[in-house]
Image: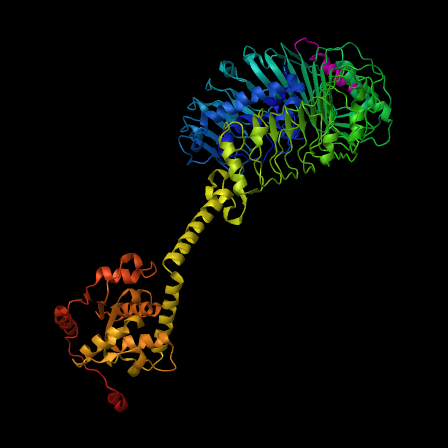
């Protein structure tokens, strides 16, 4: 595993002014010493890609090729930083951040339980015992970027748990040495005004110390003797103000450290000639190297004392300003050395670029990484520059964030397995007709000026071992319809994200592609007639314009699908049925239309494992209709009735049919239309009556009885009934003599019933057959309920069999069953009793209004 990057991480420092959350603060306090302000341009030792959502699967496979360099970044930082974060993640009240608050002294009102205290970037000039003695649990203390001039180590004698102490970037000139807590792991005294290295003999008791940062203007060989027995992980040595007296050669012996970071003056030409020797040095980092053709040899001589040991595997140069000629000399010097990983960050090339001879010795170098290049030479031979890099006999080459516009194809079969040319200015002509990169496995051309996908595919034709290709963040398009792209058959990982590709890109893909990243393009759908995607396992289509969730009909091996940030409103419910091998679906942040179709998709999501649908449920919300906007899909519910058309039809039609049948039965057997007509006529008559003035509307009785009978029974009525009633002074209303001409029959019937004290109905089989008799019975019965009086007298002239009464005359059936009726006896001897009962029914004194009374009124 590479160790140079670990050294980079340990020895860089935090830029002043950056802010963190309270929980991250603890980790940042430890992590902050990894980046110095002088090195701000070199922020990519642990370079986290800023790609859009959904890149993780693809970047992981691409960056596996860089794992020997990058893995130690991740493991070391996670162990160091996040271990501390986890320890205090639930105790954020123990973290006090008072940085950049213009303090002139340490506050006296700090919480006694404070464990992490950040007082950096203030104006504090003095420290006293009382400032920190009451903070018995203090573990981390940052006092960098203040104005402290003197330090008495004894002020920390009560801080037995102190592990991290940062006093860098102050004005310290001396230290009063006293015993210090042995729990200290990180001590930074760099970038101060010390004349000699501030080493106290008491530092030798810091058995847990990992990091030590120091400053000095002069060096003595045994300055570090008090800590020589300690096994330090990293020593940071600030030599910005170092000066050497003429004719005096200084030396410094560093016995035990794995990483050494030396920082020189940023604006002075390199002139340090001190001899530094380190046992078992694995990582060397130099910052602020300014050289030209005249003093280039001084740098090489300085490096000769540090780079000859076989343990030095990682070498990093930060902020280097040099001529092209000196840079080539540095390469030539390091080529036979045991260094395996060479990193150059923030490189500036000055003066001129001419062709230089370079002998490619057999080398142990595995990787050369050059990032952030500034070329101040504007007229030069492109071949002179590119040839040095294209012919290198190493496995891995990275040249990123540079103004290079091209790269030459190696003249001989190349040893490159990994090439990274991110953020250059390469065009479609790069590596065309190149047959010497036969063992290249990974090629990254991210953030260049590629435009034609067909030419990109043609570029890979001779790269017979190419497995991973990243051409994201270009301007690639593909408008051909013949699908005749010439990809090398070995490509399995292809990143085409952040380009200008449309649906036609699916006709221009490598034949054995397994991982495909197409996020952030202009794709609307996957054409149904596309073939050759049987091996595709991972597909990223995030941030496009897809309207539908694609199935797996043509993607038979698909296991990972990323399709968030599209225009999908109604994903198919049978997606999981067509994609049996899917083990990860990311489809959130789409404008879901909460409808019945979506209900089926939600149900299908609930039937799969919770690990399959990533971001569920927080990233899956309704966008339409407005009433459901923002509602999580898991909380969207709609009834089965409103979504099942067949059930809805049955629910509506069946009751309708039942109602129709019932109405039909009523119409046929109960003569409902007849009753409706009666109700209508009754209502109209009553409405006309309400229009009569109030005094005329009062009920006036003119008759004792209204007689209703069938014409077939008129003989009995006129010969028996009427004479016997009239001889008792009972005034009778008969239709033939009392109906008013000009009025309708119905209106006359109603008026006669209302003007009569009683209504007599002569019942017989003939009565049953008379519709008008039934009208009169209906109105009289209705008047019974309307007036609230008992005004019906039923006379059964002849027996009426029940089966002869029509079903529609149910009122007659009801009256005969519920009310007492008088039956006309056949024996003459019983006639007297019959007439007595009739007279008894009229045994109420009723004042009748005569016609003369009407006239008087």
Q: Nearer the viewer, residue 262 or 104?
A: 262
Asked whether residue 661 is drawn in magenta, I would say: no
Q: Is residue 644 left or right of residue 682?
A: right
User: Could one spot residue 167 in this view of the protein?
Assistant: yes
Q: Position of residue 378 (x, y in %)?
A: 84, 32
Q: Nearer the viewer, residue 357 or 662?
A: 662
Q: Position of residue 630 (x, y in %)?
A: 51, 44
Q: Is residue 685 left or right of residue 764?
A: right
Q: Residue at x 58, y 26 (%)?
A: 582
Q: Is residue 596 above or below residue 706?
A: above
User: Could one spot residue 639 in this view of the protein?
Assistant: no
- Residue 796 figure quarter: bottom left
Identify the image's colour scheme: rainbow, by chain, secondary structure or one colour.
rainbow
Asked whether residue 309 is drawn in magenta, I would say: yes
Quadrant in the picture for the C terminus: bottom left
Which residues, given as a range, are shown in magenta?
296-311
Q: How many marks?
A: 0
Q: Nearer the viewer, residue 782 or 361?
A: 782
Quadrant in the picture for the N terminus: top right
Q: Nearer the viewer, residue 167 or 778?
A: 778
- Residue 75 figure quarter: top right
Q: Position of residue 349 (x, y in %)?
A: 79, 27
Task: Spot the residue most to the bottom.
Answer: 856
Q: Is residue 502 left or right of residue 583?
A: right
Q: Is residue 635 above or below residue 828?
A: above
Q: Residue at x 37, y 57 (%)?
A: 669
Q: Position of residue 538 (x, y in %)?
A: 63, 26
- Residue 297 figure quarter: top right
């Amino acid at each position: 595993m590479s160790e140079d990057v670990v050294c980079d991480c340990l020895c860089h420092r935090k830029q002043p002014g950056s802010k963190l959350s309270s929980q991250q603060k603890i980790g940042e306090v430890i992590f902050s010493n990894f980046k110095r302000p002088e090195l701000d341009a070199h922020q990519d030792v642990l370079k986290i890609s800023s790609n859009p959502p959904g890149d993780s699967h693809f970047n992981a496979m691409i960056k596996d090729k860089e794992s020997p360099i990058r893995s130690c970044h991740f493991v070391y930082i996670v162990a160091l930083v996040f271990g501390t974060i986890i320890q205090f993640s639930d105790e954020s009240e123990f973290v006090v951040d008072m940085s950049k608050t213009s303090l002139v002294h340490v506050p006296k009102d700090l919480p006694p339980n404070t464990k992490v205290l950040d007082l950096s970037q203030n104006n504090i000039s003095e420290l006293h015992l009382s400032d920190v003695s009451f903070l018995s649990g203090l573990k981390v203390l940052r006092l960098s970027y203040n104005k402290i001039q003197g330090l008495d180590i004894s002020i920390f004698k009560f801080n037995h748990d102190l592990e991290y102490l940062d006093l860098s970037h102050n004005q310290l000139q001396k230290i009063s040495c006293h015993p210090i807590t042995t729990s200290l792991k990180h001590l930074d005294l760099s970038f101060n005004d010390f004349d000699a290295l501030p080493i106290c003999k008491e530092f030798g008791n810091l058995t847990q110390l990992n990091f030590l940062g120091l400053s000095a203007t002069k060096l003595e060989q045994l300055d570090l003797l008090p800590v020589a027995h300690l096994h330090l992980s990293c020593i940071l040595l600030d030599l910005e103000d170092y000066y050497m007296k003429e004719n005096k050669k200084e030396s410094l012996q560093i016995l035990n450290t794995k990483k050494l970071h030396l920082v020189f003056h940023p604006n002075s030409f390199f002139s340090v000639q001190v001899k530094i020797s380190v046992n078992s040095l694995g990582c060397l980092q130099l910052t602020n190297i300014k050289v030209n053709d005249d003093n280039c040899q001084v740098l090489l001589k300085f490096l000769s004392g540090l780079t000859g040991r076989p343990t030095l595997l990682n070498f990093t140069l930060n902020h280097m300003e040099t001529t092209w000629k000196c840079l080539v000399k540095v390469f030539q010097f390091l080529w036979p050395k045991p260094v395996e990983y060479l990193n150059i960050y923030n490189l500036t090339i000055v003066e001129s670029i001419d062709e230089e001879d370079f002998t490619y010795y057999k080398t142990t170098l595995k990787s050369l990484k050059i990032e952030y290049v500034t070329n101040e030479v504007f007229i030069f031979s492109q071949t002179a520059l590119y040839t040095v890099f294209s012919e290198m006999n190493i496995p891995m080459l990275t040249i990123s964030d540079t103004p290079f516009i091209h790269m030459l194809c190696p003249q001989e079969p190349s040893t490159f397995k990994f090439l990274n040319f991110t953020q250059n200015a390469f065009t479609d002509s790069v590596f065309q007709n190149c047959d010497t990169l036969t063992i290249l496995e990974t090629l990254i051309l991210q953030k260049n000026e590629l435009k034609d996908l067909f030419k990109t595919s043609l570029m890979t034709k001779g790269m017979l071992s190419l497995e991973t290709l990243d051409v994201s963040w270009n301007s690639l398009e593909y408008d051909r319809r013949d699908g005749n792209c010439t990809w090398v058959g070995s490509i399995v990982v292809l990143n085409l994200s952040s380009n200008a590709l449309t649906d036609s890109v699916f006709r221009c893909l490598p034949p054995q592609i397994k991982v495909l990243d197409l996020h952030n393009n202009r794709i609307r759908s996957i054409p149904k007639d596309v073939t050759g995607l049987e091996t595709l396992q991972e597909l990223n289509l995030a941030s496009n314009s897809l309207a539908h969730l694609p199935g797996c009909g043509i993607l038979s091996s698909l296991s990972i699908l990323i399709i968030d940030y599209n225009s999908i409103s109604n994903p198919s419910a049978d997606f999981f049925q067509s994609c049996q091998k899917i083990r990860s679906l990311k489809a959130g942040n789409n404008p879901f239309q909460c409808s019945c179709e979506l209900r089926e998709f939600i149900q299908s999501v609930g039937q799969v494992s919770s690990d399959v649908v990533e971001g569920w449920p927080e990233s899956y919300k309704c966008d339409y209709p407005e009433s459901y906007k923002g509602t999580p899909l898991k909380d969207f519910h709609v009834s089965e009735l409103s979504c099942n058309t067949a059930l809805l039809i049955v629910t509506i039609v069946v009751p309708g049919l039942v109602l129709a049948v019932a109405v039909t039965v009523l119409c046929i057997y109960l003569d409902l239309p007849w009753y409706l007509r009666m109700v209508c006529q009754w209502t109209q008559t009553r409405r006309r009556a309400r229009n009569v003035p109030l005094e005329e509307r009062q009920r006036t009785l003119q008759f004792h009885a209204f007689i209703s009978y069938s014409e077939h029974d008129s003989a009995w009525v006129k010969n028996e009934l009427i004479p016997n009633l009239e001889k008792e002074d009972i005034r009778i209303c008969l239709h033939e003599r009392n109906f008013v001409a000009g009025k309708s029959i119905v209106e006359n019937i109603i008026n006669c019933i209302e003007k009569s004290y009683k209504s007599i109905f002569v019942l017989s089989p003939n009565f049953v057959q008379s519709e008008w008799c039934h009208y009169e019975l209906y109105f009289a019965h209705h008047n019974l309920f309307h007036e609230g009086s008992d005004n019906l007298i039923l006379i059964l002239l002849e027996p009426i069999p029940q089966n002869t009464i029509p079903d529609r005359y149910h009122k007659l059936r009801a009256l005969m069953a519920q009310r007492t009726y008088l039956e006309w006896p056949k024996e003459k001897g019983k006639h007297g009793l019959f007439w007595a009962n009739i007279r008894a029914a009229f045994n109420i004194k009723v004042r009748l209004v005569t016609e003369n009374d009407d006239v008087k009124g």
